[in-house]
Amino acid sequence: MLLDDHIRERWERSGVALVRQGERMHTERAYLHACLNAAGSQLHLSRPLFDLKGKSLEGSPLSRMFQSAPALPPPLPVTEVEAGLTGEVGEHVQMRASLELSRQKLQVSGHHGQVQVKVPQNHLWSPSQLVKFGSCRFHWMAEKVLKLLPFPEVEKTLQRATEGTFYHKVLEELLRPHLGIRPNPRTLLLELPGAFERAENVLLENGELPPLPHWPFQHHELLENLKNFVKSHYFMLQGTLPQQLEVPIEHTLQLKNGPFSYRGIVDRIEQTKHGTTVIDYKSRNYISELRRPDGSKLELQLPLYLMAVGGQLGRYLSILNREKHLLRTVGPAHTDKGYVWEDHKKEVMDFLEDTVEQLSQGNFQPTPSESACKYCDYGSLCRVRAGQA
Ligand code: SF4
């Protein structure tokens, strides 16, 4: 409410103490703001034009400002969200909400996971990408195509991946001076601490080994682990000639639907009595394999490497498993009972053909399984809860 001269006069005559002239403008403004805030929809301002004796009255300085105030713009159209807040939800919003609710209940449509994604024909695959694709195409698409990556974590302790990098680097430093010659196992053992130190310096320098608080203790443990591995008969079979280390490979296979290219890094290539042999180091016992819908497993990495280098034998060696340093052997020269290289190779090729076909159809349907979903970061996107898997 605005106090004009007329009201002031009447109130003052009745004994009401009113603010002095200099404060009027501020007080009026404060009243106006209070009225504006309290108004439900519209605020009407009025003032008397004459006093009780018929004398014309001047408007207050504030009320005079309104005569020249610009007209208010027309109200903005009500947004979808504002309408929703008042309970007026449009039909298409309701449709989207019910779709969302049904997805949360895992009632997905037949087109779930169909994405129009063009993967170039010359896309370079790696064995780990292929295992991911084969285990769950949605997982691969979210990571490799949409590039939705989880936030990196700050390492406070030695992570498994860093530990693996470290072991690989030490073994590389150890064997590099022995390429092209048959190394003596005792010499390798003696040279191990020096190789360890060189690897440590290189990785600290390039930031791959972060400065960790417990490193002096872990340092000792890692060196002991490597001593056990290098001492083992499986580390370097008698008569072996190491040829190349940490070899980057890139290879293209001709499939029914066109070329298929992949790359990788072979830890070691050597010549043995079986011919060209490729070695892959694993820290523990885990070999990343594709788990197929029928529960069977398919190992891809060493077969792909053998095809790329024309190798005869592939061996996975575990650094930490003291009872079983040799985890598995594959390839044409591996003739143990129950293993047929031609069958293994055919399964790999069939899987690659299927991969190319699924890609061409834009089929990235999530295929949950306990093993695929256990460490997957995309559960909230594919809407398959870990429990469901
Ligand atoms: S949670 Fe499971 S189904 Fe979902 S994207 Fe990951 S692996 Fe695929």
Image (spheres, rainbow, N blue to C red):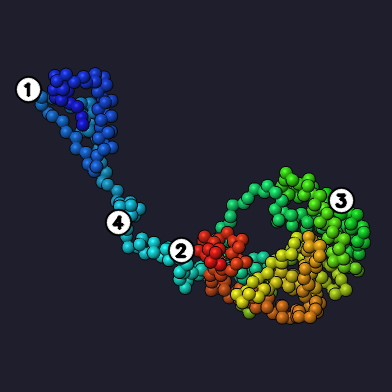
- From the image, tell me which residue sits under label 1: 53
- From the image, tell me which residue sits under label 4: 88
User: Label 1 vs label 4: CA separation?
Assistant: 54 Å
Tell me: residue 46, above or below residue 87. above
- From the image, tell me which residue sits under label 2: 104
Residue 306 visible to an observer of this rendering: yes
Of the numbered discs 1 and 4, the one sitting upstream in the chain is 1
Mark 2 or 4, closer to the camera: 2
User: Label 2 vs label 1: CA separation?
Assistant: 75 Å
At mark 2, the secondary structure is helix
Of the numbered discs 2 and 3, the one sitting upstream in the chain is 2
Where in the figure is residue 325, as x and y percent of width and height? 81, 65
Q: Answer left or right for 235 relative to 211.
A: right
At mark 4, the secondary structure is loop
User: Label 2 vs label 4: CA separation?
Assistant: 24 Å
* Amino acid type indicated by mark 3: Gly
